[in-house]
Image (cartoon, rainbow, N blue to C red):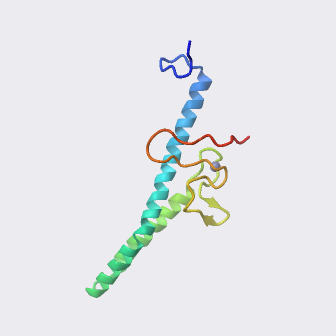
Amino acid sequence: MNQASDPSGNESPATAKAAELQLQQQVILKKIGRARIRLLVCCWTLPVYIIGIWILLGNGRGIDTFMFVYIALSAGFALDMSLRRCPRCRQQFFVKSILLNLISRRCVHCGVAIPAGNRGSASLDQGEQN
Ligand SMILES: [Zn+2]
């Protein structure tokens, strides 16, 4: 019998649990990826923000609310991102020492990568730790 990928459920509990763990890890990594994209979008919209302030000032309107919302959003996203933990090594995914590594698509501690796109085929084939 070929036991490689039998969906009809004759897997041992250990295998099933390992698969579930890996699935959870994928879900967490995707969330981390989305948190990263949110903050990147915030950075990319900085010119729009500056133009917006320019226009508001030109119209003689107050910019307090606009500034506050933008800064609060950015700070919120940055905080959310910095608090994300790697599903494999349980360390902060983007934070090593003080710097937040925005560019990284990998855990700065163990190197596990954020999966590209929404397909389930992620690269978890890094060298296993332990
Ligand atoms: Zn890690």
Residue for point 56% across, 36% down: 22
Comparing 21 with 102, the one in front is 102
Does 34 sit left or right of 60 as displayed?
Answer: right
Q: For residue 66, which quarter of the picture?
A: bottom left
Residue for point 57% across, 48% down: 113
Quadrant the C terminus occupies: top right
Q: For residue 11, which quarter of the picture?
A: top right
Q: Position of residue 99 (x, y in %)?
A: 62, 66
Residue farthest to the top? 1
- In the image, residue 111 sits, relative to residue 127, either above or below, namely below
Residue farthest to the left? 59
- In the image, residue 80 sits, relative to residue 4, either above or below, namely below
Residue for point 34% across, 79% down: 51
- In the image, residue 9 sits, relative to residue 114, either above or below, namely above
Q: Position of residue 37 (x, y in %)?
A: 46, 58
Residue farthest to the front? 2
What is the number of callouts on the image?
0
Quadrant the N terminus occupies: top right
Residue for point 28% across, 87% down: 58
Q: Position of residue 36 (x, y in %)?
A: 49, 58
Q: Position of residue 48 (x, y in %)?
A: 36, 73
- In the image, residue 7 sits, relative to residue 42, either above or below, namely above
